[in-house]
Amino acid sequence: MIPSVMPTYARFDVVFERGEGPWLYAADGRRFLDFAAGIAVCSLGHCHPRLVAALKEQAEKVWHTSNLYRIAGQESLSQRLVELTFADTVFFGNSGAEANECAIKIARRYQFDKGRPERYRVVVMSTAFHGRTLATVAAGDQAKGKYGFGPETVGFDRVPFGDLDAAKAAVGPETAAILLEPVQGEGGMRAADFAYLRALRELADAEDILLMFDEVQCGVGRTGKLFAYEWSGVTPDVMTIAKGIGGGFPVGACLATERAAKAMVAGSHGSTFGGNPLAMAVGNAVLDEITAPGFLDRVNAIAAVLRDALAERVRRFPDLFEEVRGLGLMAGLKCRVVNTDVVNRLFEEGLLAVPAGDNVLRFVPPLIVGREDVEAAMAILDRVCETWRKNS
């Protein structure tokens, strides 16, 4: 008999009833150090006082009105994001997949508005992940997300991630945009070369197509800058964010330049729940914290500690791990053993981590973790590795 909760997840047998900072507490009394952060979502950890206060305050005022009316929180958060980024305008949704759907629609509408409706295709990357709607599954490169769902949504041309020549060859008379993650999360914690991103910018300009960055996982402070594109100096036309901007509350956003989005007029796109007052209250509070003086400096400092610690484990356990990947607090260990087996063993010892593609073990802790948390995580990883080696 099928369970009442549709069985689309392979869940761990644990129920968390309380969280504080980087720690989660289960109903059965177990305590876990959370280096998964809800898959890079809980950017400020669990039950951050500022986020709790913002949500409580807004909950006592108004929860939902729809986008038929102005929403003050949208206006303030969008203005702040515009001031902090390349963007001129922001559309709010509830998830990264929705943000990427909006980006794809912007690319098509941009070309349509220029009298080129035949330009609807998007160049996308191998090992990419952009969401689980029919369009974003097609844009991504995860076979398990496509299996059994019939013909793929058309309009995507895939090239190897990092291969400039392949990207150039894929751009043709039907191309509307290029879409990629500056740092791939699900695809194996692969960071794009900065020169590659600069060359894609030049290609997009030369062909009058949009360059679109998916920063759903790597954005909002995760890499040590507010957004990952800042490391390269490359400015996209469209950028999608979610995960960290809500700190655990469902928030997604699509940021765009006026040039890219000027054809997105009333009725061209929408969302019933997107940008609701509760979500905007939390999003503004998250941005308050992450843009506070010294916050990102601290992220970079602790990221260096984590990276050095992981590199030491590669040296100590070369039979288990190959290399360290990622950027900032988006760190991965390429495994020589099955990554999900490592995740399971870490779970049994009280450390939460996430598997990623290419047999990578993914660590995406809250951005507020300290050195003592990294040391505690590495102590658990060491125990698992030493036991593994002893029993192999």
Image (tube, rainbow, N blue to C red):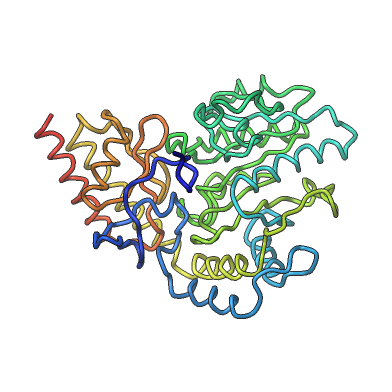
92 lies above or below 192: below
Tell me the quarter of the image containing the N terminus: top left
**Residue toward you, 339 or 12:** 12
Residue 147, given in percent of the width and then of the height, sits at: 54, 26
289 lies above or below 84: below
The residue positioned 50% from the left and 65% from the top of the image is 290
Residue 339, given in percent of the width and then of the height, sits at: 31, 34
Tell me the quarter of the image containing the C terminus: top left
Residue 79, given in percent of the width and then of the height, sits at: 69, 65
The residue positioned 32% from the left and 48% from the top of the image is 13
**Residue toward you, 262 or 145:** 145
Q: Quadrant of residue 190?
A: top left
Residue 12, given in percent of the width and then of the height, sits at: 34, 46
Residue furthest out toward the right: 115
Q: Quadrant of residue 169?
A: top right
Q: How many marks?
A: 0
165 lies above or below 9: above
Image position of 283 (left or right of 48): right
The residue positioned 27% from the left and 55% from the top of the image is 374
Residue furthest out toward the front: 1
Q: Quadrant of residue 358?
A: top left
Residue furthest out toward the left: 390
